[in-house]
Amino acid sequence: MSRPEPVSRRERPAKPALSRAAIVDAAMAVLEQDGIGKLTMRRVAAELDTGPASLYVYVANTTELHALLLDRLLGSLDLTWDEVEPWRDRLHRVLGDYVELVSREAGLARAALFVWPDGPHYLDLVELILRLLLAAGVDERTAAWGVDLLLQHAGASVAEWSTRAADSGQRLEDVAAQLDAADPERNPVLGSFDTALFTQGHHTTRTLWALEAVITGILDVRFPSAP
C-alpha cells in the first residue's frame, strides 16, 4: 500500500503582509466580536494567524493599539463645517456625535479618557473644534485647553453612564436612598432638598447640558495669574 503523498507547503496561500492598517482591521474585528475587554495583542495576533511578537514591529503596545483604533472609529464622524451653521450648534452636534460613537462600547469610552487617538481623523476632530472655538472669539490658549476639556468631559460622561448600565455593583436607587436618608440636623439643606433631582434626566440630556455648561465656562473663564 503506497503512502499518501505529502502536501507541499508551497500550495498554501501566502499570508497577507502585516501592516498597521491590517492590525487595526483585526482589532476592529475583535472589538465587534468580543468587546474591548478581549482586545489584547495576543487576541489580535490570533485573528491575523501570527504570533504577538510580530505585531510589536508595527504597534508598540495595547495603548497604541487603542489609540489607532480610536482614530479609525473617528473616521465615521462628519468633521466638516460650512461656516453657515452657527458655531455653537455645530459644536454641540460634533460633540453629540462623539458621545454617541464612544458610547457604543463602555471600555472604549474609558480608554478614550487616557489615550489620545493616533491618526489623521483625530487631527481633523481637533481642527474642527479649534475652528469653532476660535469663531466664538476665544484666544488660542483658551481654544487649545477647551478642546482638551470638551473631549475629556464628553468621554467621562459616557464612561460613567456606560459603566452604570453594565452592572457596576451600584444602582441609582441606592444613591437616591442614601441622599434621602440624610440627617436634617447634620445636613439641613440636603435634608429639605428634593433629592430626586440628583438622579433625574436621561443621560444624553444630562451630558448635553453639562457640555453646554462647559462651553459657557470656556467663553467666560479668566486665566489665573499663576502659570
Image (tube, rainbow, N blue to C red):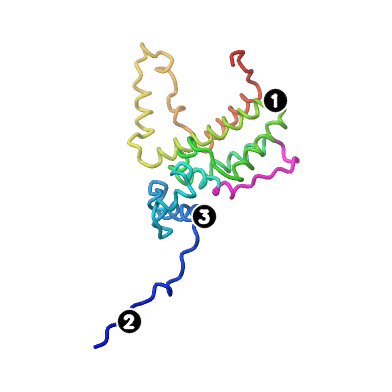
For badge 3, the amino acid type reads Ser
Is residue 203 or residue 158 the one in the foreground? 158
Q: Are marks 2 and 3 in contact (CB under 8 Å)?
A: no
Is label 2 or label 3 in front?
2
Quarter of the image where one finds residue 81:
top right
x, y (%) of residue 2? 27, 87
Circle 3 SS class: loop
Of the image marks 1 and 2, the number of the one nearer the N terminus: 2
Q: Which residue is mark 2?
A: 5
> What is the residue that sits farthest to the left in this orientation?
1
Q: Residue at 45% of width from left, 70% of height from top?
A: 13
First in residue order: circle 2 vs circle 3:
2
> According to the image, label 3 marks what residue?
19
Q: Viewer-proximal residue, 212 or 43?
A: 43
Q: How busy is the neighbourhood of tag 3: few (under 14 within 10 Å), some, or many (20 plus)?
A: few
The range drawn in magenta is: 72-87
Residue under the image location 40 percent in, 41 percent down? 165
* Mark 2 element type: loop
Q: What distance separates the C-alpha of mark 2 from that of mark 3? A: 36 Å
Please give the residue where the numbered disc 1 appears in the rendered image.
139
Residues packed near mark 2 inside 10 Å, few (<14), some (14 to 19) or many (20 plus): few
